[in-house]
Structures are given as structure tokens and as C-alpha cells.
Amino acid sequence: MKQTGWILLLVAILANACAPNNVKIEKSWEKYFTEYKVEGCFMLFNNSQGTFKVYNIDRAKERFLPASTFKIFNSLVGLETGVLKDTATVIPWDGVVRSVPAWNQSLSMNQAFHLSAVPYYQEVARRIKKPEMQHWLDTVQYGNKKISRIDTFWLDNSLQISPDEELGFVKKLYFDQLPFHKLSMQWVRAVMLMEKTDKYELSYKTGLGIVGPKKIAWITGWIEENGHPTFFVLNFETEDQSMDIPTVRMAMLKNLLKDAGYMEGLK
């Protein structure tokens, strides 16, 4: 398909998520994926300029398990239903020793989000219960909306969402356009803030899931410079079991953002 055809297709698929006026296929971003020998995509939507840049549109349309990026949604539903009173809500440790030492303690929502504590959010989902969770998945139209077991469905490849849908979701969260109370969305945005400097604020949630021999990695969120948000989604997969995915994932995100002119406070 010619470049023009790709652009028209991209505008059509992403209309609900971002409604971009200007779309650019960034083939040059391939080098960041080649460097680590991973297959993936990166999407970047500058809200103030209305410009959209994407690498690997085919993958951008494909759905994958959301893994821990689902903690954004789980937090919103937990707060909305009162399962979580606020970001300071503590869930006591169940005494089960797990492979991540930081999880083996009682945690607040804020701590659990930053530590990406799976057990905490499994308990949140159990307290929400399946019918209520299904209601919110259907209401928000989150990915394929499928629940298997209430405390594993975002990890076991039942629930799936595309990078495009993830981008639309975080954009709506930023602008209070999801069907939750504004305070719930405000609290979740607050816990998503991971880096704050005099040049930029970086808000995101990471994810890492396993499907057969593949590891699926995510980062979704936004970077804000001078009060202007730009939304992003990085998604890639690897079968390299020795890869330090958290390090690679963050290095790729920051290299891609820098390549696009971000992190200097100039946007």
C-alpha cells in the first residue's frame, strides 16, 4: 500500500482514540527496536499540535494482554466502587512470600502502583467482583472486555487491548473523559506521575506479560512539557529470556522521546 493509503487507514483506525489531523509514519524509529532485537511499535500523539507519529502500524492495531498496564483501569474501578477509599488505602500482606521482596508487606495503593504489586491488585479485583468489573469493562469499552478468572484475566491472555486502544484510554483519562468521577481520575493521574523535573513530567504505567515463549512489554502514559501533554504507547515482544526488560523498556522509551524532541522542555 502506498504511503497515502497507510495514512488514510491510520486516521480511520485511530479516529476514536486520538482524532489526529496530521499523521506521520516514522520508519526511522525502527533502529531502536533493531538495537535490542525486538518486534514492537511506538505511538506518539502531541495533543496541542494534533500531530500523530507511529512506528509499525500493523502491530498498533493488534491486541495483546495488558499485563500491569491494567493497574490503571483496576485502580479507577477500585476507587469508583469504594473498594479503595483513596490512594492511601492499605491492603494487609497475606503472608505468602513471593519472588519480589517489596511485595511481601502491607502496601497502600500508591505503593502498590509504583511497585507494580500483582498480589495487591489481585485482591482489589477480587473485592470488586466479576459482575462489577465486567460492567466497567463494557462501559469503558476496554479492549476485548473478556474476563476469565477475576484475579488473573489481565495476565492470562483473556483480556486483550491494542496499543491504539491503550493510547485512547490514557488520553481520555488525562482529560477526564472516562465515565468515572473526576476525583477517581485525578487520584490515578497522581499515582502515574513517575518523574518530575524542571523540563518535563513523565507519567506512565509499565507492563510485562508472558504468552508462550514470548514476553510482552508495555509502557503507556504521557509526557508533559510547559503544560502540553503528549501521549505515548511503547509495546514490544521478545523471546530472549535473559533480557533485562525493565531496563531495555525505559531506555527505548527515553531514546524514542528524545528522538522526537522531548525531555528538553521545548514542547
Image: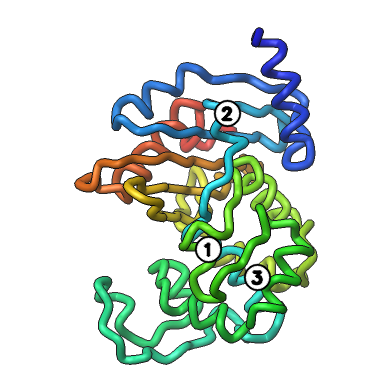
Q: Nearer the viewer, mark 3 or mark 1?
A: 1
- Mark 2 lies on a secondary structure that is helix
126 lies above or below 178: below
The label number, if any, that marks residue 103 in the structure image: none
- The local crowd at label 3, few if under 14, some if 14 to 19, many if 20 or more residues have their Cα within 10 Å, is many
Residue at x 33%, y 25% (from the top left corner) = 34
Image location of residue 234, percent across then percent down: 49, 40
Position of 186 with respect to 54 (left or right) is right
The quarter of the picture where the C terminus appears is top right
The quarter of the picture where the N terminus appears is top right
Residue denoted by label 2: 58
Image location of residue 35, percent across then percent down: 30, 27
Q: Nearer the viewer, mark 2 or mark 3?
A: 2
**What kind of residue is marked 2?**
Asp
Residue at x 47%, y 62% (from the top left corner) = 156
Do the residues under discs 3 and 1 have CB atoms within 8 angstroms?
A: no
Residue denoted by label 3: 76
- Mark 3 lies on a secondary structure that is helix
Q: Earlier in the sequence, mark 2 or mark 1?
A: 2
- Mark 1 lies on a secondary structure that is loop
Residue denoted by label 1: 154
4 lies above or below 70: above
**What kind of residue is marked 3?**
Leu
Image location of residue 43, percent across then percent down: 57, 34
